[in-house]
Amino acid sequence: MYHVCNPAQRDDGVAMFTGDTVFVAGLGAFFEGNAQDMVSAMKKLYYINADNEFVDDDKTYIFPGHEYTLNFMKFTQKIVGLHKPTNSEFLNEQVNRYQSLQSQGLPTIPSTLKEEKVQNLFLRVADPKFVKAMHKGNEEELMEFLYNACD
């Protein structure tokens, strides 16, 4: 069972319901905001457990409002293949896992914050090392690049 409240008394993790903002390996549309707003939101999510001694990223489960996992993972593989900002072995393992789940009629969600910090390029815009490795300018410019490249 996943718990939403009082993580200090739960040993099986906490749930984060991200709706249309963050998907597994992806991001929602900028309907009422821009790249700067989304970078700000991603930083909050990326560092949400930084000062929380009770919850680790691998125990923070992300439940998005929609399941677009494989499409976003294919996008991630494409971008990683072009820019090489990270080890692609984990990404390939994840794609295989998600394909297996989908072929069995099982959901690919939830994901964990730990997984998303590797496979979600939009979330990784909050990581200065990733921004530098991508060579696309500052974090807002990188967010804009990823958002437009994902269309």
Image: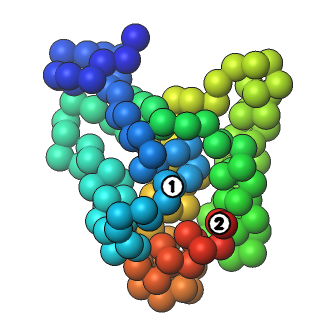
Using the numbered discs, state the Cα–Cα distance from disc 2 to disc 1 in whole angstroms: 9 Å
Are circles 2 and 1 on residues that touch, CB within 8 Å? Answer: yes
Task: Check the image and report above or below for 90 versus 57.
Answer: below
Answer yes or no: is residue 89 visible.
Answer: no
Residue 27: which numbered mark, if any? 1
Q: Residue at x 46, y 83 (%)?
A: 141
Q: Quadrant of residue 99?
A: top right
Task: Check the image and report above or below for 100 versus 19.
Answer: above
Report x, y in % for residue 109: 57, 30
Residue toward you, 30 or 128:
30
Would residue 94 appear left or right of 96 to someone viewing this image? left
Residue toward you, 102 or 131:
102
Task: Check the image and report above or below for 102 versus 69.
Answer: above
Task: Check the image and report above or below for 56 versus 151.
Answer: above
Q: Residue at x 33, y 51 (%)?
A: 45
Residue at the extreme top of the image, as rendered: 1
Say which amino acid is labelled 1: Leu
Considering only order in the chain, which callout, 1 or 2, is on the residue closer to the N terminus? 1
Report x, y in % for residue 121: 55, 61
Say which amino acid is labelled 2: Cys
Residue carrying label 2: 150
Residue at the extreme right of the image, as rendered: 103
Number of callouts in the render? 2
Report x, y in % for residue 105: 76, 19
The N terminus: image quadrant: top left
Secondary structure found at label 2: loop
Report x, y in % for residue 10: 25, 16
Q: Residue at x 61, y 36 (%)?
A: 67
